[in-house]
Image: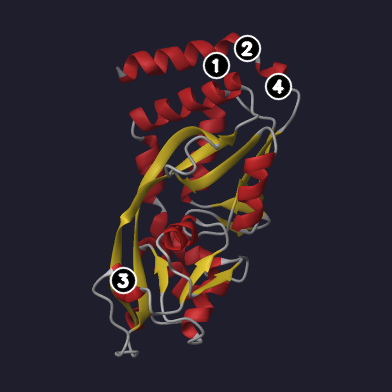
Amino acid sequence: MKRALLSFLLSIGTLVPIGTWAQTVHVVTENAPPFTYMQDKKVVGTAASVLEKTMQQAGLTDYRVSMYPWARAYDMALTEPNVLIFLIARTPEREKQFQWVGEFMQMRYHLYKLRERASITAASLDEARKYVIGVMRDDVRQQYLQRRGFSRLVVSAQPTENFNQLLNRQVDLVPLTEAATLPLCQAAHFDCEKLEKVFTLDEMTTGLYMAYSKSTPPALVARTQAAFEQLRGNGTVRRLMEASQATAAKTAASPAK
């Protein structure tokens, strides 16, 4: 079945010459080390490497990659043509809002607190509701908690700002993945051992994808999908996402970010 789907995507994507797309593809993302971050005025990171390989495999050279606060990147992908956004969580609410290309990885989120704040405990989502929680604007974590009746949310534009709210005790909890904690701690010169998981948001476990805006030509989407599936099928996506994460996390803490 997968082989038949890949052949179908390839046939669609190659029917239309690359030059038919007059507009440059605008690729948008946020600062989320080790997956995406700025270095020497360029977006780099493990996920950025997957993006670059995908575009090469698809034969797409007319594209530019920009980093924005998540809310802006998300709005551009919702409203503008020829926008490719990554990494974006694929949720039922977003399913029909984008044209989905491929999954980078599965993400599992946890509520973290400062270990020294022993009075903060939450064995359930209901117990967590009484605390002030820091989230990112228009991020899947904000959307998830709001749907479940959380009202004590402090919204930030950047991950580092959100994390600093926790360190400064302006919020009690922040939802993070394990992979995100190390670069955030390094950037803040904070010992990650002083963080503690309080509760795992199992319902939020989801895939992180790249996705095109709805008004993007279907042939362009198909070409990119086919290229991504080839890279995932031969193990390139997995190797790129795993092999350089340690190096990327160290680099993300540098002033160049």
Label 2 close to label 4 by CB (< 8 Å): yes
Q: Position of residue 73 (x, y in %)?
A: 63, 50
Label 2 close to label 1 by CB (< 8 Å): yes
Query: Which three-letter amino acid code belongs to the residue tagged 1?
Result: Gly
Q: Secondary structure at mark 3?
A: helix
User: Please, is residue 96 above or below residue 241 in the view?
Assistant: above
The Cα atoms of the two marked residues, 2 and 1, are separated by 6 Å
The residue under the point 50% across, 39% down is: 210
Sequence-wise first label, 1 or 4: 1
Point out which mark residue 126 bears. 3
Residue furthest to the right: 22
The mark lying in front, picked from 2 and 3, is 3
**For this view, does 163 lie left or right of residue 42?**
left
The residue under the point 44% across, 68% down is: 150
User: Please, is residue 85 above or below residue 187 in the view?
Assistant: above
Query: Which three-letter amino acid code belongs to the residue tagged 2?
Result: Val
Q: Which residue is mark 4?
A: 21
Query: Which three-letter amino acid code belongs to the residue tagged 4?
Result: Trp
User: Please, is residue 38 above or below residue 111 in the view?
Assistant: above
**Does the image show residue 67?**
no
Quadrant in the picture for residue 113? bottom left
Q: Position of residue 20 (x, y in %)?
A: 71, 16
Q: Which residue is mark 1?
A: 13
The residue under the point 40% across, 38% down is: 237
Give the mark count. 4
Q: How is the image coloured?
A: secondary structure
Q: Position of residue 48 (x, y in %)?
A: 53, 46
The residue under the point 40% across, 79% down is: 131
Q: Which residue is mark 2?
A: 16
Near mark 3 (Cα within 10 A), the count class, few <14, some 14-19 or many ≥20, is few
